[in-house]
Amino acid sequence: MNSRKKFLQQSSVLLGAGALASAFDNQAFAYFKNRIMPSDQLNIGAIGINGMGWANVKAAMKVPGVNLVAVCDVDKSVIANRLGELSKAGVSTSGIKTYDDYRKLLAQKDIDAVIIGTPDHWHALIMIHACEAGKDVYVEKPVGNSIEECRRMVAAQQRYKKVVQAGQWQRSQQHFRDAVDFVQTGQLGNIRTVKVWCYQGWMKPGPVVADSAPPEGVDYKQWLGPAPIRPFNSSRFHFNFRWFWDYAGGLMTDWGVHLLDYGLLGMKSPIPKSVAALGGRFAYPDLYEETPDTLTTLYEFDGFNLVWDSAMGIDNGSYGRDHGIAFIGNNGTLVLNRGGWEVIEEKQSKNKVSKPFAAPSDNGLDKHWENFVSVVKSRKTEDLHCSIQAGAHVATVAQMGNIAFRSGKKLVWDKTKERFTDEAINKQYLLKEYHNGYKLPTV
């Protein structure tokens, strides 16, 4: 074990300083960095730094002892902007290496852990390769872009014994955990229906525009990776990738894995018995998208149903909230979202369970990173707030909903074989075909 690895065994006392006001806090940040020996610090590399990848970098750098030593992005302007942001905040960038190919970053020997913040279609391949390279991994959600990808990601973690945290940071936010604890007390009575909804008025696909040359400094071939070759189109790029089946799964896998996760967690649910879905491009038929902007999905479990309801372009969702999870029981309904939770009493119930609104009191992303670093130190993967196994579970459920929508069928799941009973559906949808010479490793 080299000297830097001693960091992994040290006390977690310093994590208490992780709640710095800013990722790039000047004097306080420098103070804690200087208090930790260079040999005891954790070096991270970030792959994909345009959106949540960069949010993760900032959260990681709040944890004392964590150093950013490398970044990778296929868009040179993104790298330039991020390094400029660091410099402007007074953070030295002289020791940060830059790459446009993630494989070169993984070959950098002094990197202990990597952040994967790429579009979804890259998550599985990079995560497996990172584990092979001996790195711990923080991978953004959804962890896999297909059910088979999810399985192989779990297998890679088990084979290489690395710490892998899925980026479902709500798992680390205390009010979410408190709400689930309350659900599981049984005070709501028999829960027959769980509603999960996501109404996002601000979200819009891009306009229909002509194909064009990629912007200067963008390695578009590398961005596509295992996805099919198509001409560059600005409305399929950066944020808008999530509305196309080649790269992602729409709102179902974007917000759905966050919200479905707590519906499943609260009910201690396995994979559903069956799934059916209806929806379409109803909100923005003239904009550029493939995934549905309106979708209703029904999951069947033993003893209850779970309903997913999503809509772009509308904010007025259930219970006056634009997103949330509702556990509907005989005695009351618990409504939970990022803004807090409360229990609404069932009028006819003799069991009084009304509970006033509880607001969030912490930063879930920061806490999620503190948890990840703590487990990297301890190697106790059972302490992860969202292991790759947990991330794969909800990503599988989300993928099932999308497959039901795309196939137009009610699908039945065979839990013993871990596949649908319809083999034609399995052949078409369980694993997305890889292109351009890329192959998903068999682990």
Image (tube, rainbow, N blue to C red):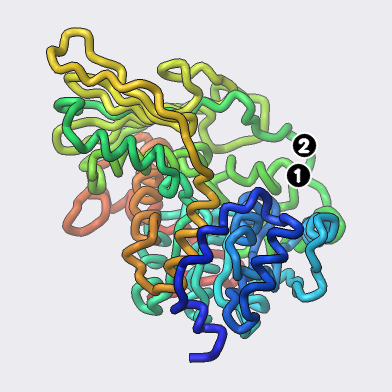
Residue 196, image x, y percentages: 38, 30
Which of the pair 262/379 is nearer the observer? Answer: 379
Q: Residue furthest bottom?
A: 1
What crowding class fits label 1: few (fewer than 14 Cα within 10 Å), some (14-19), or many (20 or more)? some
Position of residue 167 measured from the top left corner of the image (x, y, whole percent): 49, 53
Which residue shows up at 40% across the image and 52% down it?
429
Q: Residues within 10 Å of mark 2 (few under 14, many from 20)?
A: few
Query: Which residue corresponds to mark 1?
Result: 234
User: Under tag 1, what secondary structure?
Assistant: helix
**Is residue 167 toward the left or the right of residue 223 in the image?**
left
Residue 333 left/right relative to 226: left
Q: CA distance from mark 1 to mark 2?
A: 8 Å
**Residue 234: x, y in percent?**
76, 44
Q: Is residue 182 visible?
A: yes
Q: Residue at x 39, y 67 (%)?
A: 152
Q: Position of residue 180 (x, y in %)?
A: 30, 38
Residue 209 tag number: 2
Q: Quadrant of residue 153?
A: bottom left
Q: Amino acid at mark 2?
A: Val
* SS for dot 2: loop
Q: Residue at x 16, y 57 (%)?
A: 416
Q: Is residue 261 above or below residue 87?
A: above
Vertical position of residue 309 compared to residue 395: above or below: above
Relative placement, left or right, of 351 versus 40 is left
